Image: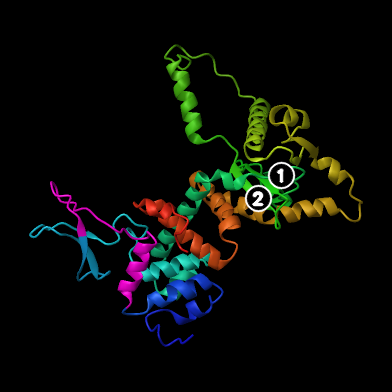
């Protein structure tokens, strides 16, 4: 590949990513100076830009067409009625609408997200403000999270005769170092349910925040108020809350949530391996129909000098534990998106090339107003 054809693109950045065949073979030629029309036509073909537009002027609503304009994108949507001033940017309603850089730069930032490059590194290489890169990364994460949420069928775990391993972060089997450095005076960590499907190599890990959502607590308080349980009558004398009872209630709710998730995502005939704390065997069989084995019984079979079962467990949970630990410092909504992004990458981002192709496909699914994007022919 000749590097002199991209005088307006960061050559070092792009050359280092030859492993992304989709970017190099499909998108790269469209980023040449003077090929904006080819790039825009390709984006419209892939439903990444709108194919049609209606005039936004009141009482008009006429079809619009692209016309040349002295703007960053060099084109605008313009009303086809003579004398009407209706205009829209060609980015209107697309992934790029609130991104303040050239579209071709935005595509390179999406590539940087696929490669897991830091915001600082990406902004430095592409000469963009960190806040611009951060916005694009955030939108990519939201697209990935929405896709995983809308496609639970991709996360049917286990199989007849298969095995899944279950744990809740933080735990001694998953995150002993995190537990060791956690102070009792710190806020309670976010509990994250992790289910590893061992039929995949490496194991595919499904994850979900376990703790009660803030909106659920608000709903419960609102219902109590509506039922008169929280009325204006004189309140009873305040009692010192029992920390033990509160902890027990939280634990019981957690076990119930774990069993409910197992019933939802684990296929019948799968063997469940989990700690007796979170996966009690009798309720597991009664409520889900699944059979199980306790982690404790497997670890007990380890020889003192080998600890093979314990080491295998920690190897299974290694990456998931890192994700869970990173999620601790995020607000709940961001932590949820971060977890779903990790799940998305396991299926759709196994390589840089597949990540780039799939995230563009899923961006089209999220933003496009055309239903053609649902066709299997898209991106073929």
Q: Is residue 79 magenta?
A: no
| Above-or-below relation of 11 to 303 | below
Task: Say the numbered circle drawn on residue 39.
Answer: none
> Mark 1 or mark 2, which is nearer the start of the sequence?
1
Name the residue at the top extreme.
233
Neighbours of disc 1 within 10 Å: few (<14), some (14-19), many (20+): some
Q: Could you tell me which residue is drawn at 58 percent across and 37 percent down?
A: 211
Neighbours of disc 2 within 10 Å: few (<14), some (14-19), many (20+): many
Where is residue 324 drawn, in percent x and y? 62, 50
Report which residue position mark 2 lands on.
205
Task: Say the numbered circle drawn on residue 159.
Answer: 1
Which range of residues does the magenta coloring cover? 35-64
**Disc nearest the viewer among 2 and 1:** 1
Q: Could you tell me which residue is drawn at 51 percent across and 45 percent down?
A: 149
Distance of label 2 from label 1 (alpha carbons)? 15 Å
Where is residue 281 drawn, in percent x and y? 77, 32
Q: Which of the 4 image quadrants contains residue 194?
A: top right
- In the image, 280 versus 172, the foreground residue is 280
Where is residue 29 drawn, in percent x and y? 41, 77
Q: Is residue 274 visible?
A: no
Q: Is residue 206 visible?
A: yes
Q: Secondary structure at mark 2?
A: strand
Do the residues bearing badges 2 and 1 touch, measured as CB atoms within 8 Å? no
- In the image, 137 versus 324, the foreground residue is 137
Q: Could you tell me which residue is drawn at 23 percent across and 69 percent down?
A: 71
């Amino acid at each position: 590949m000749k590097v002199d054809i991209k005088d307006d693109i960061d050559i070092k950045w792009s050359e280092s990513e030859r492993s992304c065949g989709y970017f190099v073979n499909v998108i790269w030629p469209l980023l040449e100076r003077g090929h904006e029309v080819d790039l825009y036509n390709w984006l419209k073909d892939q439903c990444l830009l709108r194919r049609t537009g209606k005039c936004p002027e009141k009482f008009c609503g006429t079809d619009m067409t692209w016309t040349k304009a002295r703007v960053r994108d060099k084109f605008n949507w313009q009303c086809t009625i003579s004398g009407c001033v209706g205009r829209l940017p060609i980015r209107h309603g697309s992934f790029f609408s609130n991104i303040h850089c050239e579209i071709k730069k935005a595509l390179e930032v999406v590539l940087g997200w696929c490669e897991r490059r830091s915001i600082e590194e990406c902004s430095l290489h592409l000469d963009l403000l960190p806040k611009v890169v951060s916005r694009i990364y955030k939108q990519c994460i939201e697209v990935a999270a929405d896709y995983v949420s809308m496609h639970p069928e991709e996360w049917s775990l286990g199989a007849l005769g298969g095995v899944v391993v279950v744990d809740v972060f933080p735990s001694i089997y998953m995150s002993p170092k995190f537990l060791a450095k956690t102070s009792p005076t710190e806020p309670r960590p976010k509990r994250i349910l992790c289910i590893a499907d061992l039929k995949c190599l490496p194991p595919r890990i499904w994850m979900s925040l376990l703790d009660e959502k803030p909106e659920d607590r608000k709903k419960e308080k609102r219902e109590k108020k509506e039922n008169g349980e929280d009325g204006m009558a004189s309140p009873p004398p305040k009692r010192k809350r029992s920390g033990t009872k509160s902890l027990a209630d939280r634990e019981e709710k957690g076990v119930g949530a774990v069993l409910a998730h197992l019933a939802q995502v684990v296929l019948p005939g799968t063997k469940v391996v989990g700690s007796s704390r979170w996966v009690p065997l009798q309720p597991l069989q009664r409520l889900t129909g699944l059979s199980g084995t306790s982690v404790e019984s497997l670890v007990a079979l380890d020889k003192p000098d080998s600890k093979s079962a314990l080491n295998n467990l920690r190897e299974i949970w290694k990456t998931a534990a890192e994700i869970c630990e990173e999620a601790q410092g995020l607000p709940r909504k961001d932590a949820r998106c971060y977890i779903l992004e990790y799940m998305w990458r396991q299926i759709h981002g196994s390589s840089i090339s597949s990540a780039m192709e799939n995230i563009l496909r899923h961006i089209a699914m999220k933003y496009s107003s055309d239903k053609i994007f649902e066709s299997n022919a898209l991106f073929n």
